Amino acid sequence: MPTINRLAEMHDEITAWRRDFHEYPEVLYETHRTAAKVAEILQEIGVDEVTTGVGRTGVVGVIKGRNGGAGKSIALRADMDALPMSEETGKEYASKNEGAMHACGHDGHTAMLLGTAKYLAETRNFDGTVILVFQPAEEGGAGAKAMMDDGLFTRWNVDEIYGLHNQPGTPIDHFATRSGPLMASTDEFTITVKGIGGHAAYPHNTIDPVVVGSQIVSALQSIASRNVGPLQSIVISVTFFQAGTAYNIIPDTAKLGGTIRTLNQDVRKQAAERVKQVVEGVCAANGAGVDFEFNDGYPSTSNHPEQTKFATQIAAEIAGSADKVDENIEPTMGGEDFAYYLEEKPGAFIFLGNGDTAGLHHPKYDFNDEAIPYGCSYFIKLVETAMPAT
């Protein structure tokens, strides 16, 4: 197997860490137990520096190479947070925290980075410095930005940054990524249509916000087909529509909301402006008022060319064949706050196969522990190749 042999000996220990995290999931910035456990393990395995409370509940570890850490510095990131949902796996290590579940594999990401740290702290077969970034609140809380705002790139010197995410439906010894836009921006909008309510038998005496809201839903779909070029990627989804309390009452208001996903900053800006114009125009045409709120989400996750090429070379070595690495995967319209790091520092984000498991964010999802040696080996080989010991 192309993975590092020492990891076979460490596999049970890393798996135990992973399942412990899985059993006690924590959401957003409430990763107090997880962060404490991460910090404890980092100290036990001999990491040179451990700092907690970065970006509220993030943890940063530092491992210095054989030359005392002089020269290049590479950051490796794992996200620690879970999702606010209930688990249905039936595993013996299933969530003990009601309403929280590791349904996206962040428990696996955290455990793999800890395994990487243990190996690198033992061997130190590199020059330079490795910065270990254990981040909270990837799932909608912009934990990456919080850690940056708290000095991640000023308190620690970082030249490049790398991360990975498991990918269900892909064999565990396969990798996939691409240069440039890999994942979408994740902006959100909320629309409150202000009509005039009344009796459902006399709609002519009302301004029906349900009808107006329905027109908005349909009109928004024309943005992708008529305002954005056909070769550009954009998704506009209305994901909730709330109005009314009874069969015979036309309500005063209707509340709608959804998301805009794009891969290009110009398209992102154009879409935001056009959504607002459409919403206000439809409401005006119907005599309704409107409150429109727009929230910038994560930027598009865009890999840097040089670092992506390097990452795919390392992945091919670990996979044992270039055929097991898709160097030009189709971009996904899912989002990832690793995007914030890549706006500031060169780096690359890559997908690692998770095998034939339930999909991400599914109540029966579980990280595949057989993927652990591949994720750890990828990170280790990346460090040792980018910063070889002299």
Image: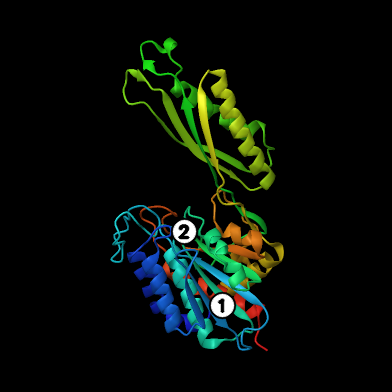
Q: Earlier in the sequence, mark 1 or mark 2?
A: 2
Q: Is residue 108 above or below residue 42?
A: above
Q: Residue 380 carries which label?
A: 1
The quadrant in which the C terminus is found is: bottom right
Which residue appears at 49% of the width and 74% of the height?
A: 51
Q: How crowded is mark 1: few (under 14 residues within 10 Å), some or many (20 or more)?
A: many
Q: Is residue 222 above or below residue 74?
A: above
Which residue type does callout 1 highlight?
Ile
Q: Residue 137 carries which label?
A: 2
The x, y position of residue 38, in whole percent, is: 42, 73
Q: How is the image coloured?
A: rainbow
Residue 126 located left or right of residue 142:
right
* Nearest-to-viewer mark from 1 and 2: 2
Q: Is residue 355 above or below residue 39?
A: above
Which residue type does callout 2 highlight?
Ala
The x, y position of residue 364, in whole percent, is: 36, 55
Q: How many marks?
A: 2
Q: What distance separates the C-alpha of mark 1 from that of mark 2?
A: 25 Å
Residue 18 located left or right of residue 74:
left
Q: Callout 2: helix, strand or loop?
A: loop
Name the quadrant containing residue 274: top right
Name the quadrant containing residue 262: top right
The x, y position of residue 124, in whole percent, is: 57, 86
The x, y position of residue 213, in whole percent, is: 48, 26
